[in-house]
Amino acid sequence: MDAPALATLIADEHPQAIAVVLAHLPEERAAAVLDGLPEDLQPDVATRLATLNPVNIHDLAALESDLEAKLRGVGTNRDSAKLAGTDFAAAVIKRARGRAGAARCSKR
């Protein structure tokens, strides 16, 4: 599934759930999905991505179950390893071309 299609499928989810999904993708793909989200949603998702704490395996399984129909073919890492954080979020935002990337530039 390409990034624009994935963005469309998850755009109606809670920003925290979107951040968890992005955290399981490679940086380049996460940036492309972030770019595909509605511009008014991008800063909230980027903030949540930067501050995302490890996700409990049970919560991750529940999220995976809820999104299964939408995310067929997208794998998840089913452990509670550190997800996202500031380095990952910075790399994703730097590569994003939408509002989340623009917000980075305007705060300098």
Image (cartoon, rainbow, N blue to C red):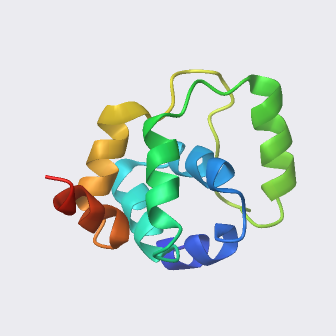
Expressed as whole percent of the image width and height from the top left, the position of residue 8 reads: 62, 78
Q: Quadrant of the N terminus?
A: bottom right
Q: Is residue 54 left or right of residue 13?
A: left
Picture layout, residue 107 above or below residue 96: above
Give the number of marks: 0
Picture layout, residue 26 above or below residue 54: below
Instruction: Please identify the quarter of the rendering in which residue 105 is found.
Output: bottom left
Q: Nearer the viewer, residue 66 or 78?
A: 66
Q: Is residue 85 left or right of residue 87?
A: right
What residue do we see at 67% from left, 60% from top? Answer: 73
Q: Nearer the viewer, residue 72 or 99?
A: 99
Picture layout, residue 58 above or below residue 4: above
| Residue extending furthest toward the left | 108
Q: Nearer the viewer, residue 74 or 18?
A: 18
What residue do we see at 46% from left, 64% from top? Answer: 42
What residue do we see at 81% from left, 57% from top? Answer: 68
Q: Nearer the viewer, residue 71 or 31?
A: 31
Expressed as whole percent of the image width and height from the top left, the position of residue 83 reads: 51, 31
Instruction: Please identify the quarter of the rendering in which residue 14 is found.
Output: bottom right
Picture layout, residue 107 above or below residue 83: below
Expressed as whole percent of the image width and height from the top left, the position of residue 36 reads: 47, 75
What residue do we see at 68% from left, 73% from top? Answer: 9
Expressed as whole percent of the image width and height from the top left, the position of residue 97 reads: 28, 71
